[in-house]
Image (cartoon, coloured by chain):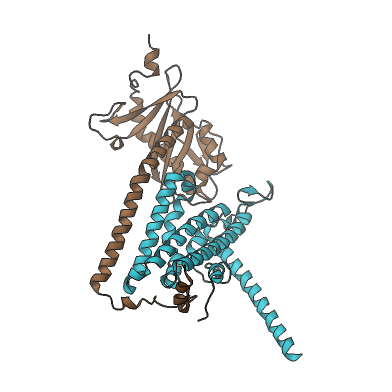
Chain colours: A cyan, B brown
Amino acid sequence: MRKTTRSEDLVRGIWKENPVLVQMLGLCPALAVTNSVKNALAMSAATFFVICCSSVLVSSCKRFIPNEVRISAYILVIATFVTLADMLLQAYAPVQHKELGAFIALIVVNCMILGRQEAFSAKNTVFRSLLDAMGTGVGFTIALVMMGGFREILGTGSFLDHPLFGPHFEPWVIFVLPAGGFLTLGFILLAMGYIEQRRRDRADKTAEAEASS
Amino acid sequence: MSDQDINTNAGNDAATVDTAPQGPEHEGASTFRLVATLAVAGALAGLLIVLVNLHTRPIIEKYQAEQLQKAVYEVLPGVERYDTYYLVDGNLTVALPPNAKEKDYKRLYIGHGSDGKVRGVAISKGESGFQDVILLIFGFDPQTGRMSGMKVLDSKETPGLGDKIYKDKAFVQQFFDGPKLPLVGVKAGAGKGLPNEVDTITGATISSRAVIRIINDAMTEWKPVLDRGIPRGTAGSADEGAQP
């Protein structure tokens, strides 16, 4: 295995190993709460908090957690942070809590967070785990905002609640409904696959040209 | 983190598909150790949650009480002050029996104008919506049977769809425009112009119908009580003081 640098730990999750679009993790919230950009941002922010706290705690306690019960221990850590986030938000930011209400409990079952604990925090230092968690959190945010933007623009005709098309726009309601989430994810993955293939074809051609010359 | 830390862990880096973490001292941990670890972790987690809850609960409750008070004035426009009436043994009263817990009793809020007359009644009720319980408060004039307002206090309805029951201003405004009770939900534009019609929301039919159902259920429940008349308010309140 190649040695990675700290900056790679941070950047990796943002695009190259994007949790939603490449690793296909955390699809449940990505499909469920992306019918508007605002919801996507709120969910991303809460998830960011939980993944950072969990990664720090798991990486600092990894010596005390026996292998056999590590998954249960990680889930316990994640669930605790989600509950704390829920209570603190309700006490100190009641307006945002009302906005987020239904999503907060969903964070516990986000396998992206559990995945990072198992794959990275459990065998790396606290600092690098935090970098990795931040990168993953940002990648998750990018994916969710992309989906939220696409769905809100087509399904409601607005972006961040600002109307875009004037009064005669007929909203494409299917895009804010659950089915629209699957369609959007499909389109985004299709576009990403297409871009990736073009890039690879071009790289192959350059290599051929170099070889023949 | 020191560079040494990084070097000791370098071998495992970026192994996103690797299996279990390699903790040499954990090989074949005893059952007791497994149980003990989880028990200690669980106890710590529980302790942490309890501590934070002890700290945040008073703040949350205070905020909710303030929100409720604000909501009562919101759904009863033009009301100077209000009294909380509890339903004790089928009768409305402002005073609870001694040693009784406030939350064990059903209640409603009766608003008075500056002249001390009853201007409106506000009732709070929660019932299941599409996802979870929708808790709302609404106000009406007991004489005319017309509504004066409605506010959703708590709901977990689908963001972007069901949450329109409090985000869609056109929907909410209908309840402030004095529809007659009991309400009837109609598809937007399909109404006959009757005074008790409320347009439901396209894409959130279940949630908006739930709002109408909750209000009608609350009316069925409270109407017999209200029909028996509203007893006098608290002693020393504004209307008492206005008496000769």
Q: Who's the residue at 48% across and 63% down the image?
A: A28
Residue B17 visible, this angle: no
Q: Is residue B100 above or below residue A16?
A: above
- Residue A87 picture location, percent across and down: 40, 49
Residue B23 visible, this angle: yes
Q: Nearer the viewer, residue A183 or A194?
A: A194
Q: Is residue B191 above or below residue B10?
A: above
| Residue B244 as seen in the image, left or right of residue B171 | left
Q: Who's the residue at 35% across and 18% down the image?
A: B236
Q: Most extreme residue toward the top, as rendered?
A: B244
Q: Who's the residue at 35% across and 45% down the image?
A: B55
Q: Quadrant of the C terminus of chain B?
A: top left
- Residue B91 picture location, percent across and down: 29, 27
Q: Most extreme residue toward the bottom, as rendered?
A: A212
Q: Is residue B188 above or below residue A154?
A: above
- Residue B38 picture location, percent across and down: 29, 65
Residue A208 figure quarter: bottom right
Q: Nearer the viewer, residue B192 or B102?
A: B102
- Residue A51 picture location, percent across and down: 46, 62
How many numbered marks are there? 0
